[in-house]
Amino acid sequence: MARRTKEEAEQTRAQILAAARQVFHDRGVGQTSLEHIAQAAGVTRGAIYWHFANKGELLQAMCDEVAIPFIDRLDYTLLQDTRADALSRVRNFLLQVVGSIDADPHLHMIMQVLEFKCEFVGERARDLDDWVRHNEELFAKLERTYTAARREGRLRPDLPPQLAALETQCFLAGLIRLRLLGQPALQAPDTIPALIDAHVRSRACPAGDTTDPPRPQAA
């Protein structure tokens, strides 16, 4: 009986998160109330308060549901994949970010909510600090990877790892935003890999192979 009750509670929580994802996407976070989510989920507001203290906590749980495994996969690709050299890891990381957003409808919807349907004001003002912190963490990881590329002799000698990391972070942020907007020029299947290859190739030392982008080394 206790197990059944726990399973029912988990099912209700998942039902609430799914409804919140859709309602936030349709109405925007600021225009969404817990009553809207309760109606969409087919539950009472009391059921929502059983699982989440407020709308902000519900939004955070919705993001964590996809973000934590997503970040873990990307950290491995960028920092830990010993089969690839540093510039190849940057390339694979960029491809995996965009590819994961395209392949996962839930992640795609949440990214649209965060980019276009959410204001970092009022009770969400503190979340902006978290957003800045996450970007600083990404910058540090990219700088670490480009520093490895410098040690490998693959990074252009005139390009400091710090600047290379910042350029890649700006490139990725713009690419994701325009892709989420549905810009027609970015919808062709080969466009994203071509852009990423061009970006990574521009990082490479001229003494290396500048004809083809860096490719992962064999395991």
Image (spheres, helix red, strand yellow):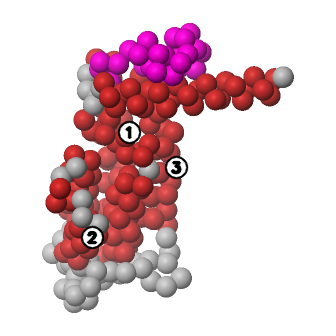
Of tags 1 and 3, which is closer to the observer? 1
Q: How crowded is mark 3: few (under 14 residues within 10 Å), some or many (20 or more)?
A: few
Residue visible at 27% across and 70% down in the picture = 190
Amino acid type at mark 3:
Pro
Does the rendering let one see residue 216? yes
The residue that disc 3 covers is 69
The residue that disc 2 covers is 190
Residue visible at 67% across and 24% down in the picture = 9
Of tags 2 and 3, which is closer to the observer? 2
- x then y, percent, for residue 187: 24, 59
User: Given contact means CB atoms under 8 Å apart, are the residues at marks 1 and 2 in contact?
Assistant: no
Amino acid type at mark 1:
Ile
**Is 198 left or right of 43, judged from the image as shown?**
left
**Is 28 left or right of 72, judged from the image as shown?**
left
Which sits earlier in the primary sequence, circle 1 or circle 3? 3
Amino acid type at mark 2:
Asp
- x then y, percent, for residue 57: 46, 24
The residue that disc 1 covers is 110
Does the rendering let one see residue 148? no
Which sits earlier in the primary sequence, circle 2 or circle 3? 3
Span colored in magenta:
29-55
Of tags 1 and 2, which is closer to the observer? 2
**Is 48 left or right of 149, judged from the image as shown?**
right
The mark total stands at: 3
Q: In which quarter of the image is the N terminus?
A: top right
